[in-house]
Amino acid sequence: ALAIWHQLTKSEIPELAKASVLIRDRSRVEETIQAMQRAGPDALQVISDFDMTLSRFAHNGKRCPTTHNILDNDLLINDASKKMIRELLNRYYPIEIDATRTVEEKLPHMVEWWTSVHELLIQQKIRRDLLAQAVKQSSAMLREGYKVFFDRLQEQQVPLLIFSAGLGDILEEVIRQNHVFHPNVHVISNYMDFDQSGVLRAFKGQLIHTFNKREGALLHAAHFRELQERPNVLLLGDSLGDLTMADGVVHTQHTLTIGFLNDQVEERKESYVNSYDIVLVKDESMDVPNAILNYIT
Ligand code: TMP
Ligand code: MG
């Protein structure tokens, strides 16, 4: 196995040998990639988180906004609300990523965070016709190499399910403006409900936050028949909560998980390496997922 691994990293997927790549069980990763390669693109689906996974965590040392934070714009909300959204972020984001708390401890805080922000957005009467402009004015960016990633999946007709606790309307606009909202892309997220005059009045369906993606996955599983016929899953995320995104796929054969570790690296390294098959430390590119996809499709 070691010899094969050596060949896989050195000649086929040299990206896996980069210093920023951490792998707990190299033979498992190697075997999974080989099995996925043998089964080919028809057996594959990709399930990915959006914020801080497909989108960048930072660019030139500056944090990039999540889909919620793209709404932090004068076009859409007043100064008091902007301040409030930032305060909520400063209060709850450290809880979200805290390595010393369990998911159970975090849950009520996440519900509070999302609920407060969504209520605030409804109060501000956000207008649908201004969303595209707010996205244009924001510093949101997809990871380096995103176009190769989306285009290849489309070419190979591999479905890409984007599963986001962010805002569906905004993430769709981000990928549309980057010209990668291809027909193979499906989205599960929090969608806005507008009244007849195009003003936000509620959010549709069950709330999705960072740590209830399992429930969301099970709820939506039946709607994605096409995905049930593809037993191999490449999963991309940046939170430990993202690992449950494939729980709605009933008959999985091989699953390879890739986790972006963007923040609190030393505190969280161990738990990420124990949970994700491949961990990418402060890597703002899609190089590793692209190299793996290039090999298996
Ligand atoms: P994701 O599932 O696409 O990663 O989206 C969820 C992220 O959004 C999560 O990491 C927390 C973040 N978030 C904000 O940045 N601001 C907010 O106001 C809220 C509610 C969430
Ligand atoms: Mg995320």
Image: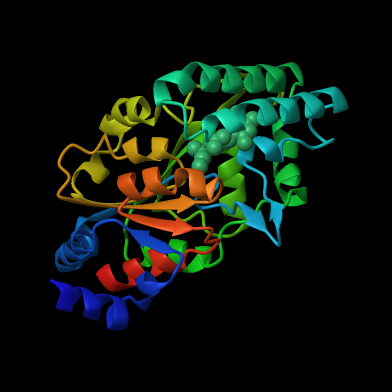
Please, is residue 19 above or below residue 43 in the view?
below
* Quadrant in which residue 85 is drawn: top right
Residue at the (66%, 16%) spot, across then down: 119
* Quadrant in which residue 114 is drawn: top right
Please, is residue 224 above or below residue 125 in the view?
below
Question: Is 225 or 135 nearer to us in this picture?
Answer: 135
Going by the image, does 78 lie left or right of 184? right
Question: Is 263 or 219 nearer to us in this picture?
Answer: 263
User: Where is residue 253 shown, x and y percent of the image?
Assistant: 14, 49
Q: How many marks?
A: 0
* Quadrant in which residue 191 is drawn: top right
| Quadrant of the snapshot with the C terminus | bottom left
Residue extending farthest to the bottom is 11
Question: Is 294 or 34 nearer to us in this picture?
Answer: 34
| Figure coloring | rainbow
User: Where is residue 192 shown, x and y percent of the image?
Assistant: 59, 27
The answer, for residue 195, to whether it is visible in the render is: no
Going by the image, does 249 lie left or right of 202? left
Residue at the (21%, 60%) spot, across then down: 42
User: Where is residue 127 shown, x and y percent of the image?
Assistant: 74, 29
| Quadrant of the snapshot with the N terminus | bottom left
The answer, for residue 290, to whether it is visible in the render is: yes
Please, is residue 108 above or below residue 260 in the view?
above
User: Where is residue 83 shown, x and y percent of the image?
Assistant: 81, 27
Going by the image, does 28 lie left or right of 165? left
Please, is residue 231 above or below residue 16 in the view?
above
